[in-house]
Amino acid sequence: MKKKINNFSRGITKRSDLPAAHAMLYATGMKEYDFCKAQIGIVSNWYEGNPCNMHLDKLAKKIKLSIITKDLMGFQFTTIGISDGITMGTSGMRYSLPSRELIADSIESVIDSHHYDGVIAIPGCDKNMPGVMIALLRLNRPSIIVYGGSISSGYYNGNKLDIVSSFEALGKKNTSKITEEEYKNIIKNSCPGPGACGGMYTANTMASALEAMGMMLPYSSSSPSTSKHKQIECKKVSIYIKKLLEIGIKPKDIVTKSSIENGIKLAISLGGSTNLVLHFLAIAKSANINFSLKDIQRISNQTPVIGNLKPSGSFLMEDIHMHIGGMPIIIKYLLNEGVLSGDCLTVTGKTLFENMKNVPNIIFNQKIIYPLDKPIKKNGHIKILYGNISPDGCVAKITGKEGTIFRGEANVFNSEEEANQAILNNQILPGVVIVIRYVGPIGGPGMPEMLKPTSYIMGSGLGKKVALITDGRFSGGSHGFVVGHITPEAQSGGLIALIKNKDFIKIDTEKNTITLEVNDEEIQRRKKLWNPPSLKVNKGYLYKYTKIVSSASEGCITDQF
């Protein structure tokens, strides 16, 4: 007897007491014989205003056509996305991280309310990936993620460009390293078409991790947005969603503590974004898996960095596709070397090890991926630091190029804008620790990324001469001696709120400590004098967000109550 795979949709299509619902389904184009078919929600983060997302509707349409050939019903819908690149350094960036929750909530709302049997999600930009993953875990019905793919590199004067090239160009122009004309040409040529930002920034970090976790088909994370491989993937995905429906494999069968560790290990080995910390804490919470900052530090300690990828390295995701052969070649290498666990289930219905059987072995005649016995860094670049500045933990991104210990006088700013102006006006002296505060989940609100100040620092030639700490977070494109996610945040009365100019701060990533070198008596005196500033917003979504968001050390989740 053929197994029923319309386990959820039959709650509408097979009920005789829902004539209006049936009438509306007929209006969508369904025929009577379609009422016995499984229904798949095909959700993309499509919108025209961002290159990361502007092509996703085309991919969704190809997937729907493929779905129909497998005797399934596919219903397209879209959810939101926020362009980090466009909003960066503006008040709009406050919505970026909170959009993760809106994405998850909206997908959960549509799929659950309409009783769809499965989900195919097509994310593009940074928060899209964790947003859809959180939703799929809440829903826990057969699901596959199809990554929109990364952008092609731009070119100017024989140099490869990407989005961070344009950010750093301003710092270079400001210090007369490039002309106004060169500056404009870099901007015009940095982003040549559709796809997510090309380096191992947040979008590609999360896509790589989700592939290693088993929630994407092999090669999804590394197939560029405009490649024929991405088109083929859109056709193949219908085979696997039907298989998942028939076997009954759900996201919580795939997302386990072991598979989460696989995802984080791959991302760290490639030099991925610090945002993976926030997102994996939230993903684990949605999967009901006990997972904390200490787990991330343990994994980072065990994982060498072998990816020579931007922002700290030289190459882009397209280079993994063109010169390595795709992400599965790297995954297979890490499996064979015992870094990853091969017995985790994936969306193919097979284990990660089984998926890699026919994948070619890596060849080390290139400079993109290094062998484990000659790594770029012997352990991970992500460090979880503790100390009086951050008793609940904070996140440092230390590749080794910038050193491992930094001690300097504090140069304190109560907003990103103030810090940006000081950097661009050449007011930052070598040897200082820049402090940007009141930009946390509540104080920001929304914990905006500090890509502008880090890019200006790098562009101004201060990358190895200053450190930056913040209760905000960093873009995957940020590099330098940077520490973010400081908790408790300034708005909640964390010690970062009490730091004064000229105080000495020591950051030691060998001992994993961050210390304000001020005695306890003086700290207590300052604490008595401190009063929290008024919230920056008093209405709308961001105001609601400030009332329910958890701290960065807990993943900035909003469903913890």
Image: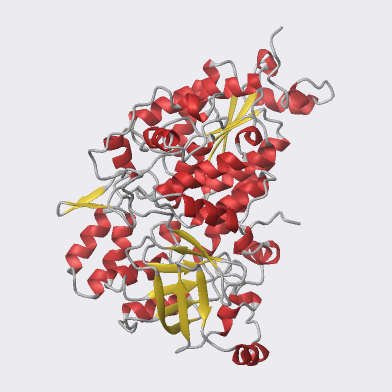
Q: Position of residue 337 (x, y in %)?
A: 42, 37
Of residue 351 and residue 174, the one placed in the foreground of this image is: 351
Please state, as top left, top right, bottom left or bottom right, where the N terminus lies in the image.
Answer: top right
245 left or right of 301 in image: right
- Is the residue 467 above or below the residue 260 in the image? below
Residue closest to the far left:
157
Q: Position of residue 145 (x, y in %)?
A: 53, 35
Q: Is residue 13 visible?
A: yes
Of residue 382 and residue 321, the one placed in the foreground of this image is: 382
What scheme was used to colour the molecule? secondary structure
Of residue 461 and residue 514, the one placed in the foreground of this image is: 514
Which quadrant of the view contains residue 88?
bottom left
Q: Is residue 90 visible?
A: no
Q: Position of residue 45 (x, y in %)?
A: 51, 43
Residue closest to the far top:
1
Q: Position of residue 134 (x, y in %)?
A: 62, 45
- Is the residue 21 above or below the residue 33 in the image? below
* Residue sitting at x 51%, y 88%: 500
Which quadrant of the view contains residue 38?
top right
Of residue 198 and residue 110, the one placed in the foreground of this image is: 198
Which quadrant of the view contains residue 373?
top left
Please state, as top left, top right, bottom left or bottom right, where the C terminus lies in the image.
Answer: bottom right
